[in-house]
Image (spheres, helix red, strand yellow):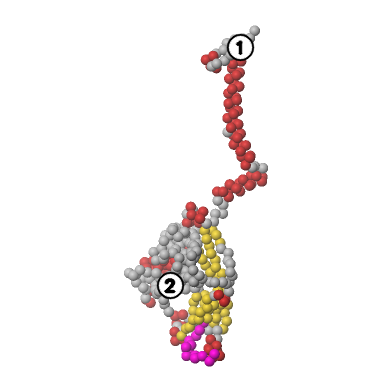
Amino acid sequence: PYFEDNGHRSEGWTLEGGYPPDAPLDTYPHRALTAGAKAGLIFVMKAWSNDADYYCKGPVQGFRILLHNPAEVPSVGDRYLRAPLSQEIVASIQPKIMTTSKGLRSYSPDRRQCYFPSERYLAHFKVYTQRNCELECLTNYTLKKCGCVGLHMPRSESEKICGGGNKECMLEANKELRRYEIESSYKDTKQETCDCLPACTSIQYDAETSQALFEAEKVFRSYNDNLTEIAGSSLARVSIFFKDMQFTTSRRSELFGLVDFLANCGGLLGLFCGVSLLSLVEIIYYVTLRLWGNMKHSEKNSMTTDIEADADGKHVNFNSIGSAKFIHKD
């Protein structure tokens, strides 16, 4: 079924900060109380046999499951897990969180290879993520080429939804956009590119899956339950839970900042040349104060030598030396 409005609203949750400190335990998005299958999410999906469409969907019938963070719009056409009919799927989830240090805000997005929330805004989404940006870029290109957008794409009230006759045009638009993206990457051009860098804070989920036969009909019969509810249908059960209580996050930061560079230079000089902070002070002293003192001392010695030379000739030039003692030599 398609739900236009699920009736739930996020209560202060953000991609960068998560839940606020005063958020209650029972909130939305729902919390996982602990790791393991007993604290996970378990649900059963039912597909009617009459709804099976082998012409459009091919020989593989079943369900698609997509794991995404609450800030992203799901796109099950690209990334999904397969849930076959009459099977139970068990998925243990390991989160992958990437954060970015505040010291990288002074760098351009091209250098740090990510966008902070205040640096990039989307027309159809409140929160910037790489997948939201890619979907919006594909929507704009499809609208430009075909004059309409797909049913799964974000749109405004004035934009048309593509019908079955536009299927080939939508597929061709997707291929052209991907081709332009690849060409611009090695030509270093910005023409017809989406420029969808990752968000500086991102959440992804790695899943380890296993499956087994789900014999729901035999279970109903063992309890003597009425089978009319599942007659003419196939069931699939899915169990999703976090694998561990803790997980390790990654952080994007400077490899070498200015302080790190100076510290490494000082360490190398101290190791190979015996240079220390006292050595630097001595160099400054000899270059400035000691040089200035030597120059002053040299000027004083030169003045004293001129006085003695004039005294030997019994003549003293008071105008040149100012106040001086007359020296008479017998």
Q: Quadrant of the rendered structure where residue 293 is?
A: top right
Q: Residues within 10 Å of mark 2 (few under 14, many from 20)?
A: few
Q: Which residue is mark 1?
A: 327
User: What's the magenta region?
Assistant: 223-236
Q: How many labels were placed on the picture?
A: 2
Identify the disc placed on residue 8: 2
Q: Is residue 180 visible?
A: no
Question: Percent position (x, y) of residue 212?
Answer: 57, 81
In the image, is 95 to the left or to the right of 72? right
Q: Residues within 10 Å of mark 1 (few under 14, many from 20)?
A: some
Q: Amino acid at mark 2?
A: His
The earlier-in-sequence mark between 1 and 2 is: 2
Query: For the residue labelled by badge 2, is the local secondary structure a helix, a strand or a loop?
Result: loop
The spot of residue 45 in percent (x, y) is 49, 81
Q: Residue at x 52, y 81 (%)?
A: 237
Residue 56 visible in rendering: yes
Q: Is 256 placed left or right of 195 in the picture? A: right
In this rendering, the label closer to the viewer, 1 or 2: 2
Classify the position of the N terminus by image quarter: bottom left
Q: Position of residue 188 (x, y in %)?
A: 47, 57
Vertical placement of residue 65 versus 226, above or below: above
Q: Is residue 163 above or below residue 306?
A: below
The amino acid marked with disc number 1 is Ile
Residue 11, percent from left and from top? 45, 67
Q: Quadrant of the C terminus?
A: top right
What is the distance, in whole Å, between disc 1 and disc 2 at their CAs?
Answer: 107 Å
